[in-house]
Image: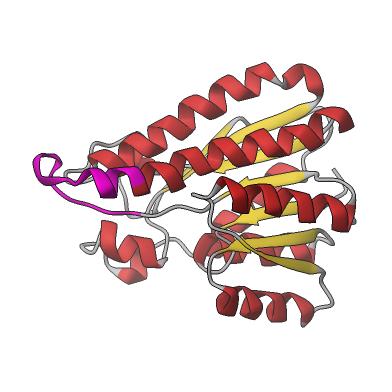
Amino acid sequence: MDLHGKTAIVTGASMGIGKAISIALAKEGVNVVLAARTIEKLTEVKKDIKSFNGNSLIVPTDVSSKKDILNLFDKTKKEFGRLDILVNNAGIFTGGNLVDFSIRDYDKIMNINLKGVFICCQQALKIMIPQKNGFIINISSNAVFKGYPEQSVYSASKHGVVGLTQSLANEIQKDGICVALVHPGGVDTDLIKHSRPDIDKSLLIPPEDIAKTIIYMLNLSDNSWVDEIYIRRRAAKPF
């Protein structure tokens, strides 16, 4: 697909993987809608994009809020008239033993990591289905393959994203919309500092590698698509 002139929404765009994806898309000529909670950090990303004459729009968004998500998609459609790409990247991590885990923290994780993805997909489809095309890429985690201790709730939220994505991909294939999963393992972000403080920082995956993977997927020919990609640290155990 020729990405130039397309429009994308990236959630969690203010830092880490989301920032890297937003910049990579803008370098391909995509109009990038930057969605996250922190305006100051979004402004920094916008400045980075503007430095190479890329185009972006800031829409402060808390993906746990349906009102914020509706505003995000409304402003995107008003500004660009369409939506070609949605990258559901926003996510949080809280660890802890299941026996002591609070319902408050459980709800917070599920509202952002799973419900936010659900509502964003729902709103994207309202634009993409009439267009008869579009791409939705959901960022999951290697936690869906490995049962890390003290990560049961985070893992459950990402398993939910997998189930949602797989069913949705089959549901809307007839509408010309492609849906995919990317499972990063051990990326150099703030989240990894809390979830895997045991990993040597020098062995972590650069966020830009995840962004390059997204660009690879979107640049495939009209006859090809990738349903799922798992990217591990080279130092981690294969398979």
75 left or right of 202 in image = right
The answer to whether residue 73 is above or below residue 153 is below
Give the percent coordinates (x, y) of residue 117.
54, 40
Of all residues, the one furthest to the front in this rendering is 67
The quadrant the C terminus occupies is top left
Give the percent coordinates (x, y) of residue 214.
65, 49
Determine the image quadrant of residue 237: top left
> Does the image show residue 140?
yes
The answer to whether residue 239 is above or below residue 108 is above
Give the percent coordinates (x, y) of residue 104.
27, 48
Give the percent coordinates (x, y) of residue 17.
53, 60
231 left or right of 199 in image = right
Give the residues drawn in magenta, as a range.
93-107
- Nearer-the-camera pick, 29 or 77: 77
Q: Which residue shows up at 71% across the image and 30% down it?
A: 178
Q: Which residue shows up at 60% across the image and 65% down it?
A: 20
The quadrant the N terminus occupies is top right
